[in-house]
Amino acid sequence: MEWETVIGLEVHVQLATKSKLFSGSSIEFGAEPNTQANVFDLALPGTLPVLNKEALKMAVKFGLAVEAEIGMKSVFDRKNYFYPDLPKGYQTSQLDFPTVGKGTLDVTLEDGSIKTIGITRAHMEEDAGKSLHEDFHGQTGIDLNRAGTPLLEIVSEPDIRSAPEAVAYLKKLHSLILYLGISDGDMSKGNMRCDANVSVRLKGEEEFGTRAEIKNINSFKFVEKAINIEVERQIDLLEDGGRVVQETRLYDSEKNETRSMRSKEVANDYRYFPEPDLLPIIIDDAFVEEIRATLPELPDAKRQRFLDEHKLSEYDAMVLANDLATANFFEAVVAVCDNAKLSANWVSVDLQAYLNEAEIPISESPVTPELLGGLINKITDNTISSKIAKTVFGAMLAGEGDAEKIIESKGLKQVTDSGAIEALVETVIANNPEQVEQFRSGKEKVFGFFVGQIMKESKGKANPAQVNQILKDKLTS
Amino acid sequence: MSISADDIAYIAHLARLQISEAEKEEAAISFKNILGLIDQMQSADTDQLEPLSHAIETSQPLREDLVTEKNQRDDLQMIAPKCEQGLYLVPKVIE
Amino acid sequence: MFKSGLADIARSLAAGEFSSEEITTAYLARIKEKDKELNSYITLCEEHALAQAKAADNNRAKGETHLLAGVPLAHKDIFCTSGVKTSCGSRMLDNFIAPYNATVVENFNQAGVVTLGKTNMDEFAMGSSNETSYYGAVHNPWDKELVPGGSSGGSAAAVAAHLSPAATATDTGGSIRQPAAFCGLTGLKPTYGRVSRWGMIAFASSLDQAGTLTRSAEDAALMLNVMAGHDPKDSTSIDIATEDYTANLNKPLEGLKIGIPIQHFTEGLNAEVEQNIRNALSEFEKLGATLKEISLPNSHLSVSAYYVIAPAEASANLSRYDGVRYGYRCEDPKDLEDFYKRTRSEGFGTEVKRRIMVGTYALSAGYYDAYYIKAQKIRRLIKNDFDAAFADVDVIMGPTSPHTAFKIGSQSDDPVTMYLEDIYTIAVNLAGIPGISIPAGLVNKLPVGLQIIGKNFSESHLLNIAHQFQQATDWHTQTPEI
């Protein structure tokens, strides 16, 4: 039997406001428990919500970026359930009239093809607090600093067909929200979280299978693993003649398994109804256009421009455009050295390798765009070879200064004086009569041996093009 | 419209209210009466009407994104039944 | 001294006839003496009141003073008061001391008004008789065997018995107007959104509105001048300029068109009450008004729709009372579920639990459309009825309640009978428009209330109409022996 996987993702993105969705409490990360929870956040009697304008603008901004229908009238609803980290006993969310309606997101798949994933909606809602299960004499401790933090929940259509597609979608979404500046997307802090609705069906089947919802997956890696393991579980179940139960499951990354969340056993009956403490949000075209005017160049447009303007390869353009900070870094390097190809290589290969290894973001790179551009300039003006450039780059990372200084202090300047190179060539030819004989008898492969020897003699500093030319002349004369 | 003891138990659970067997019966009776009153609504033809959830039909006001609150934990936890290390304590939450 | 209302006391303070400290001390003493029989106060703010009074006297001596500075007042125990218990008539909040003032309270404090105490009320404002209070029933000063009405029964009884010159109150379905009628007072429910709800404990958010219980329309105007206004902390507070509500009190009523809804004069209405209302309407004709019979064809559906919408909103509003952050918490819970259920079942009284259950049911899966959405559509119908009526008439008048105050305990068996108490007042809350109840006669020595309903933001006009009636009649000056 051939199975097809059907996935829809619900992604919660924490909006990068200063204050909460409905109160003036700070949402800064890492504060002492309950020091950022005011009378409203604690749901004291008589307290009331007032909507944060910035959160609304960010939601609309996202909607415009995915070319969605913008809800000119959106409505907050109360979603009722009891949980100790939910102070009001309801979460203020949006059900029937979300701020962002149907939109789309283009995702580049592993084979380079582009797939359009539908976005069903994106709505604003408040986050809950945190339950700390460390032992307080067998009790749970509640920290409400996070309660009321503004979230944008982005719901996809069930258009995703595999775990890698899900990851590609998430990465694209991540890239987009960073471009828009509406969230820092930091998954390790839970500022971007993902719930996956996963089902399987026989290939060719029209109807969707029964889905399980995997909650709160907090890294790209776990998304892929959690979906794969859940798909495996469902297929095993169905092939053994069982049935998939519609339920909420939790991904355990340590055991790499999903398991049913027993506490949500009772069917949820959230009793949504329009929030009477908040009025419908009516926005007009002017409001939307004002936000549209602030939209930055988005990843897809930037990728296209990198292709057109900088003549990069498809791959380089995509890799660089995906991450706003990387794209900006790249363009800053180009501004210094005016060589897009070399800039792309250095940023996406050498620099990226270092950053990955050191686990630091590009914003904290010890080599600035000015330094890297300066280094590339030294390559293009033949001061150093590409190979020597790697040595200089290493020294730059170690904080030894700019290219000029490093080349100077280490004496790495390329030898381009033909007299000096001639002398080197002659020495090497004189020292290796056997190989000269071989070359002259038609074994042209030994040419490489001579180049190697000459470069070694010059400590890599001889200009390779000149070495080639002079060596050829000497050997054939 | 009648309502069963099971319905009453289900609603009580949703509302996190404890209800004894005796109370269940009593509740079922008063529920029946109240639903009788409420069901008078069904006589009206409302097909063409939009629901009205607010008496005033203006737009939601917006607040500037400013942090206006300071740490008030000590004051706010003075009225809390049970706190430790700045946390509110509840019986163990089982995930 | 105790026959006075706010305006009189303000005039006396200004004239230096007595100080705020003197009048405050006198009221506190009277409350201690008389309230044992009435139970109209839950909390007396003795120390705090005297400090406020002294401050008001000092400010007056310095010449800096608001018209109402130093005048004593009582607040319904639904308004949060910083440092003073705010119980909302519930065991759930018996130990609750808010660290903030409701905007209404803050406004009065700013004006230098003295808070005598916090008045009794139906638990979470759910009731029409003030019998559901955790602190016990309130007795009607006109006859202590009778209820004062509810939910603002404590405020009404206190003012009627001269245990406060006036009081704040709230009205979700009639909770100001019905007690005003039962206790012979002037009770104003302003337009929804006119007075801030911040710090006022929510029963049904889209219906709740703060207002006044006073001895006269003039006093209500003075109070509204302090209470009304836009509050950026309440999203449903309307940003429309307030006015001086005393400015139009003396306008003549010549040409006033009064609508008389036939639906408010049907069976169920006590004949003697009806006669008093008809007499009052004749009085308005003498003042130059014309009467016109009108129809509010869907008014019979208002109670049904209300008993879906109000409990639905309440069921969510009262979910926050869970014993985690403040308020009542049960002893020795065996697990989280037991903790929630016992805290809430022990903390809430019967009527509150009943309404939470009804609201939960109306919102639950499978019933939402048939109940909640249907009720919201009926709400639209009712608003449309008023809009149509106001195309023809300036105000609408009728009885506030179908009868006078009833005996304590006489209607506590069937909740539906009690719910029908608010049959003439509830539609006003659904439509969000303002209404006022004024004394319009006595039946068997018990007060009868006339309800006047106006268009949105017509408080000034309603107060003008009420004041003119009170200039021509003396029903509002009648007072029980106590």
Image (cartoon, coloured by chain):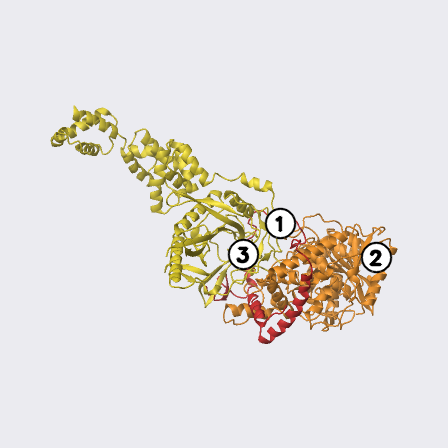
Callout 2: 10 Å neighbours few (<14), some, many (20+)? many
Q: State whether residue C119 is above or below residue A156.
A: below
Residue at the spot x=75%, y=52% of the render? C388
Q: Residue A368: name its quadrant.
A: top left
Mark identifier at residue A150: none
Look at discs 3 and 2 and give the one toward the viewer.
2
Q: Quadrant of the C terminus of chain C?
A: bottom right
Residue under label 2: C469
Q: Amino acid at mark 2?
A: Phe
Residue at the spot x=62%, y=61% of the render? C370
Give the CA separation, mark 3 to mark 1: 23 Å
Instruction: Name chain B's colour.
Output: red
- The verdict on a common chain for dots 3 and 2 is no
The one nearer the camera, C155 or A308, is A308
User: As drawn, is A258 to the left or to the right of C194?
Assistant: left
Q: Amino acid at mark 1?
A: Gln
Q: Residue A354: name its quadrant.
A: top left
Q: State whether residue A94 is above or below residue C336.
A: above
> Is residue C64 in view?
yes
- The percent coordinates of residue A282 (x first, y second) are 61, 47
Residue under label 3: A37
Mark identifier at residue B60: 1
> Is residue C74 in view?
no
Instruction: Name chain C's colour.
Output: orange
Chain ID, yellow in image: A
Give the CA separation, mark 1 to mark 2: 39 Å
Look at discs 1 and 2 and give the one toward the viewer.
1
